[in-house]
Amino acid sequence: MTYLDFLTPTYLIFNANLQEFSQTIGYIANLQTGGKMTPFQAYQEIKLAYKRLKHSKKELDIDSNNSQ
């Protein structure tokens, strides 16, 4: 696949979801580091954020084998 193959609406949406996931993980890490969240709470929130990202990948029908 070329770079242009990833400029489809589906991949752009997934990219936005991936960026949101990354930002969420950063917030969670900062809250945990700052003592506002326990490590267990942080783990649970990260797990939930990952599930949302994984669900969006499935809903957008993005196959990891096609991205090579």
Image: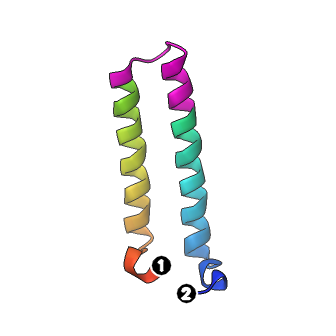
Q: Residue at x 42, y 65 (%)?
A: 57
Per the rendered image, the range of residues in magenta is 27-40
Displayed quadrant of residue 7: bottom right
Amino acid identity at mark 1? Ser
Q: Nearer the viewer, residue 43 or 20?
A: 43
> Is 1 above or below relative to 7?
below
The label on residue 1 is 2
- Along the line of sight, the residue nearer the viewer: 39 or 53: 39
Task: Please say whether residue 29 is one of the residues in the magenta stretch.
Answer: yes
Disc 1 to disc 2: CB gap under 8 Å: yes
- Tell me, yes or no, whether the highlighted magenta stretch contains residue 49: no
Q: Is residue 63 visible?
A: no
Q: Which residue is located at x 36 percent, y 31 percent?
A: 43
Tell me if mark 2 has few (under 14), some (14-19) or many (20+) residues whose alpha carbon lies within 10 angstroms of its own.
few
Q: Amino acid at mark 2?
A: Met
Which residue, given by chain and number where applicable, does mark 1 sit on? Answer: 67
